[in-house]
Image (cartoon, helix red, strand yellow):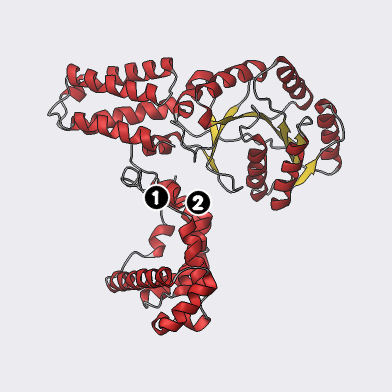
Amino acid sequence: MFEDLSLKLESALKKVRGQGRLTEKNISDSLREIRRILLDADVNYKVAKEFIEKVSLKALGKEVIASISPGQLITKIIFDELVNLLGAEKSELKINASGITSFMVVGLQGSGKTTFCAKLAKRLKTNKRKVLLVAADVYRPAAIEQLKQLADKIDISVFSFNESDARKTVKNSLKIAIEQRFDTLIFDTAGRLHVDEEMMKEISDIKEIVNPTEILFVVDAMSGQDSVNSAKIFNETVDFDGIVLTKLDGDARGGAALSIRSVVGKPIKFVSNGEKLDTLEVFHPDRLASRILGKGDVISLVEKAQQSFDEYETEQLEEKLKKNKFDFDDFLKQIKVIKKMGSLSSLLGMVPGISSQIRNAQIDDKALVKVEAIINSMTIKERRNPKILNGNRRKRIARGSGTSVQDVNRMVKQFSQMQKMIGKISGKGGLSQSSLKNLNLN
């Protein structure tokens, strides 16, 4: 989402880095351009104005003017203010020490509420919670069916009630939760295409009935300032506890993400980067600020890798790499792990300095599917010994995988080059996996 904003900010900051010292004039010129960039990104006008004023106040301090590296310091000041704008630190979900913990999910129709409910349920289930999803959107039969389909994928119970009044559905779900000893309830409430009195009255009533542990407002990050205005109205009605930003993998300008916390005064708790149920992430203001300034997000990348890699298989792979015995079977396993971690573009965006380079590149995740198909069309003997892949074998593999001989040749050549590179790295000692285990991510 933030690629365009990152590139423009990087360009503006380059001009400052070229200065020998910071002066009132070059600070003013740079911040005027940055203010324009923020407004172009659909950041709320007042938020952009206050942000620039804070940066200007710090940048004009004596220590900054006297600095020998003004570019680094102005970047650091902007980074610090971005972190403050986004909420300073992560905000954890509140979990009741005893009794039932309940989360009421609200927002406009199409914001991704129902999918988020399933994602949150999956996350809480991994934390040993017994979760019940409550289908409190009684107006859209499709919403109830969608919730049930998503819940089936993660083996979570759903409560729905053949009743047109959401209030009755909610009351009955509380009884069921007590009877069947669920410790966590997630209420998927109804959305509308726009805010209306009936909708606000209903969610206000549901809040009174449920007395939720937390109310989470789900907002489509691609909807711009409209979403910020909706957030203000919802907050005035139900006083929600946190914000969830969905569709951050889209091509929106990012203004809603940068504005909403400041406008409503509530923390962003989660961000969602896709439709898959494992694409929900705790929101870290400092990490997003780092990505916006083109510095990447190595910590999140390492965390994703640690969640996706099996420790035993990783140790086995390390041994193979040391002995230079990495084959197509190993390659196929690594492709499956990478696919678990997310899209290639989102992963590359976490690598420092790469996001600006890949902006115009066509990164096709389907390329991995093609490689998988080619490897799956090989025999066990061919996977373990690629040197036997003669012309006839390659033709058979191409037919079996629905690809061309050129595709097979290209993939085999790239794999051969990768093997040679691995051999060189292994010969020099390489990077031990144990060093990754000792990383302190806190």
Quadrant of residue 41 within the rendered picture? top left
Marks 1/2: CA–CA distance = 16 Å
**Residue contact at pointers 1 and 2, CB within 8 angstroms:** no
Residue 153 left/right relative to 85: right
Instruction: Tell me the mark number nearer the camera, choosing from 1 and 2.
Output: 1
Q: Quadrant of the C terminus?
A: top left
Please give the name of the residue rendered at 43% of the width and 31% of the height, measured from the top-left corner.
253
Q: Which residue is mark 1?
A: 362
Please give the name of the residue rendered at 72% of the width and 29% of the height, measured from the top-left corner.
190
Quadrant of residue 165 within the rendered picture? top right
Q: Which residue is mark 2?
A: 342
Residue 345 left/right relative to 61: right
Looking at the rendered structure, the kind of residue marked 2 is Gly
Res. 123 in view:
yes
Instruction: Give x and y (percent) for residue 419.
Output: 35, 73
Please give the name of the residue rendered at 31% of the width and 31% of the height, measured from the top-left corner.
9
Q: Is residue 294 above or below residue 229?
A: below
Local secondary structure at mark 1:
loop
Label 1 crowd (10 A; few <14 / some 14-19 / many >=20): few
Q: Quadrant of the N terminus?
A: top left
Looking at the rendered structure, the kind of residue marked 1 is Gln
Local secondary structure at mark 2:
loop
Q: Nearer the viewer, residue 126 or 121?
A: 121
Please give the name of the residue rendered at 78% of the width and 29% of the height, measured from the top-left corner.
139
Label 2 crowd (10 A; few <14 / some 14-19 / many >=20): some
Q: Is residue 173 above or below residue 321?
A: above
Instruction: Give x and y (percent) for residue 322.
Output: 36, 74
